[in-house]
Image (spheres, rainbow, N blue to C red):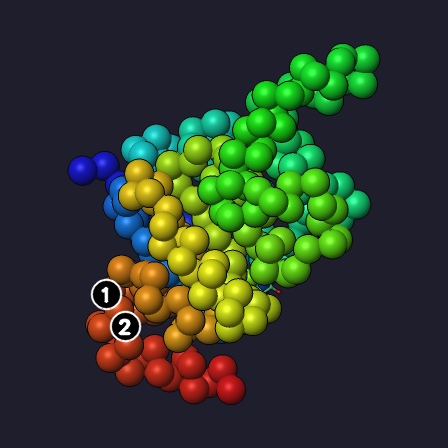
Amino acid sequence: MTPALQIGALRKAFGGLPATDNVSLEVMPGERRLIIGPNGAGKTTLFNLITGDLAPDAGTIRLFGEEVSRLRPHRRAHRGLARTYQIITLFPNDTLEHNIALSQLGLSRRRWNTFRALTDYADLYGEARRVLGRVGLEHLARRHISEVSYGEKRRVEIAMALAQNPRLLLLDEPLAGLSREERVGVTQLIAGITREVTVLLIEHDMDTALDLAERITVLHYGSVIVEGTRAEVVADPKTREVYLGDG
Ligand SMILES: Nc1ncnc2c1ncn2[C@@H]1O[C@H](COP(=O)(O)OP(=O)(O)O)[C@@H](O)[C@H]1O
Ligand SMILES: [Mg+2]
């Protein structure tokens, strides 16, 4: 089977310091892969390289068999790649449904046209509400982002990514900063994503995301130091070393 994602000898340095240091990994279609590692381990940089937000210094990135490491981010998105960010990037003074409609316009590269009747965008709002329904937020469609809780904002971001019908979804610390209750809700939401979508999930705290993952990759100083099943990774002394050093 062709991997959903295949990374080979990927490197990226900032000012001479490697953030991604010879990383190779393979994720199979339908897999839920957890990427863990201390702050500064290079987790977000790895996502930025996969999406094309950053250009690698060396190495290869294959999406469903196709080499994409020189493609612009929107071309990778058109091949089925979607992501959420560690820091929430929603427009606080717009409604939930407008935020989602805007993100879909971005993907289709249609531009918001003030001379066009708003009803032309009715399909977008209809779709936005359907997407909000998928994450249990339809009743908040007309609220402003600034009026909803942090956990609800996280759901909106996941909804936006799912609205693109991705084949590979990258979630950067979707549970960070959430209350225990919100974590349960967002974890269930992620667990409920169809297996047609391959999911890569970054989590700083090992315990929280363990339930979701089938395989785990541990990053440390930009390198993969441990990889395997949940049991293998938890049992590996290198994992404990990294997490003890993390204070
Ligand atoms: N755009 C950037 N410019 C310079 N240094 C960066 C940039 N992005 C990340 N870094 C550095 O690369 C390293 C890895 O960062 P990051 O990928 O954000 O780690 P993580 O997500 O695992 O916490 C850190 O030392 C960070 O300071
Ligand atoms: Mg990060």
The residue wearing badge 2 is 233
**Viewed as shown, does residue 136 lie left or right of 24?**
right
Please tell me which residue is depicted at 33% across the width and 43% down the height of the picture.
194
Under mark 2, the amino acid is Val
Query: Which of 108 and 94 lies nearest the eye of the viewer?
Result: 94
On the image, the x and y values in percent for residue 107 come to 57, 28
Please tell me which residue is depicted at 34% across the width and 61% down the height of the picture.
212
For residue 73, above or below residue 57? above
Q: Quadrant of residue 152?
A: bottom right
Q: Quadrant of residue 103?
A: top right
Query: Which of 70 and 138 lies nearest the eye of the viewer?
Result: 138
Under mark 1, the amino acid is Thr
Query: Quick check: marks 1 and 2 in contact, CB under 8 Å?
Result: yes
Q: Is mark 2 within 8 Å of ligand 1?
A: no
For residue 134, above or below residue 192? above
Could you tell me which quadrant the N terminus lies in?
Answer: top left
Question: Residue 229: which disc?
Answer: 1
